[in-house]
Image: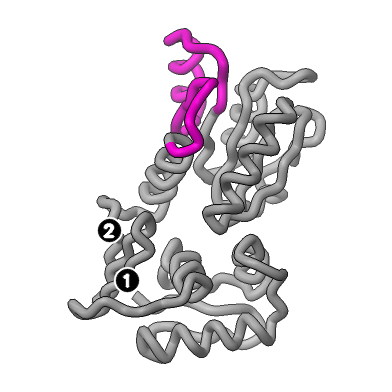
Amino acid sequence: MHLLIIEDDLDLGFALQQALKAEGISSVWLRRFADAPYIAADLDYDCILLDVALPDGCGLDLLARWRSSGLTLPIIMITARSGLDDRLAGLDGGADDFIIKPFAMAELLSRLRAVLRRYAQQASTLWTIGQLQIDPRAHRVVLAGEELDLLRREFQLLLELAREPGTVVPKGVLAQRLEPLGDALTFSLLEVHISNLRRKIGAQRVRTVRGVGYMLVP
């Protein structure tokens, strides 16, 4: 998973990146309105954490600009404003969730899992894709009633493919999203993990699109 954080507070921004990294989530951290990507096409992320009050602009204006340009990524607004009007303006403007400062990292991670679950069109915390059942929180995978023994990187790889089953995920995107779990992945190392994952869940469930990437077959 790869996130964009737009937050001007140094302590909070650093803490967010560390908490996400511990969960195997990579991120890019920006601190100003002016540094944010301008159009939806420049936002190659799984989710955006967006502060409302930036030193040189308002996060709600960024939200409006991105949604009007066609961005469909989930966006969680971070704010110190607890007023109902502010939250309603954000939700009506296209935010998927709000979290009020100060907050516990455990709450943010729970809200992040929830919006990504909705984005992946999974109705419960247990993701079901064909005979596969994936529990992202417990790091547990069951295939046709039998629990599988996946290494952490294999599990994370499966989860990334499962976010968009039937859709090809480019090799470069997978390599980037798995980077927080250790050293940056080379394509040859990625292929080793794909091979190991296929051996455990069935080779027919992970399709190679030559020259592009991999797809989880529903």
Quadrant in the picture for residue 190: bottom right
Task: Give residue 68's position: percent from left, percent from top.
Answer: 59, 34
Mark 1 and mark 2: Cα distance apart in space: 9 Å
Q: Which residue is mark 1?
A: 141
Going by the numbered disc 2, the residue's amino acid type is Leu
Residue at image position (45%, 23%) is 92
Q: What's the residue type where badge 1 is placed?
A: Val
Q: Which residues are magenta?
A: 78-106
User: How many other residues sit within 10 Å of disc 2, few (<14), some (14-19) or many (≥20)?
Assistant: some
**Residue drawn 57% across the image and 48% down it:** 20
Q: How many marks do you count on the picture?
A: 2
Q: Position of residue 196 (x, y in %)?
A: 48, 87
Q: Residue at x 27, y 58 (%)?
A: 126
Residue lying farthest to the left in this orientation: 145
Q: Quadrant of residue 51?
A: top right
Q: Indicate the quadrant containing the N terminus: top left, top right, bottom left or bottom right.
A: bottom right
Answer with left or right where residue 109 lies relative to residue 144.
right
Judge the density around disc 1: few (<14), some (14-19), many (≥20) Cα neighbours within 10 Å.
many
Q: Secondary structure at mark 2?
A: loop
Q: Which residue is mark 2?
A: 126
Q: Earlier in the sequence, mark 1 or mark 2?
A: 2
